[in-house]
């Protein structure tokens, strides 16, 4: 069961990465990137690396997302 979940999460990561690269809306790209970071945190936890998972969740999904949203708020939303 864990292997199936791992493969599904890896497929989701690839879909998120492609979606971020192809997105023309910057806010949508930031939200997809946040989802990517959260899934990475889950994968790090499944790989028995809780310290890396906590760091990924805090920095990748938390701080980076807030900074990017603040930057988008000061600029145009569309590329």
Image (cartoon, grey):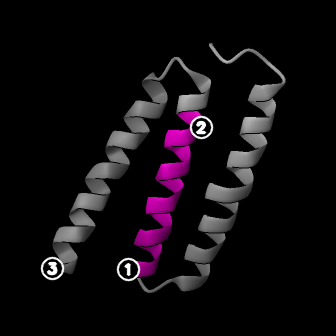
Identify whether 11 is placed above or below 69.
below
Magenta segment boundaries in residue numbering: 29-45
Helix, strand or loop at label 1? It is helix
Q: Is residue 75 left or right of residue 36?
A: right
The quarter of the image holding the N terminus is: bottom left
- Front-most of 23 and 49? 23
- Front-most of 44 and 58? 58
Identify whether 30 is placed above or below 44.
above
Residue 63 spot, x, y in % from top left: 74, 55
Residue position marked by numbered label 3 in the rendering: 1
- Callout 1: few (<14), some (14-19), or many (20+) C-alpha neighbours within 10 Å? some
3D distance between C-alphas at marks 2 and 3: 31 Å
Residue position marked by numbered label 2 in the rendering: 30
Question: Magenta stretch: dominant SS?
Answer: helix
Could you tell me which residue is drawn at 43 percent across and 61 percent down? 39
Q: Which mark is residue 46?
A: 1
Q: Is residue 58 left or right of residue 8?
A: right
């Amino acid at each position: 069961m864990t292997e199936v979940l791992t493969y599904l999460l890896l497929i989701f990561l690839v879909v998120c990465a492609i979606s971020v690269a192809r997105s023309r809306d910057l806010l949508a790209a930031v939200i997809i990137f946040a989802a990517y970071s959260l899934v990475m945190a889950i994968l790090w936890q499944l790989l028995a690396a809780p310290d890396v998972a906590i760091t990924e969740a805090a920095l990748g999904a938390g701080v980076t997302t807030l900074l990017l949203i603040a930057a988008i708020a000061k600029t145009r939303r569309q590329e």
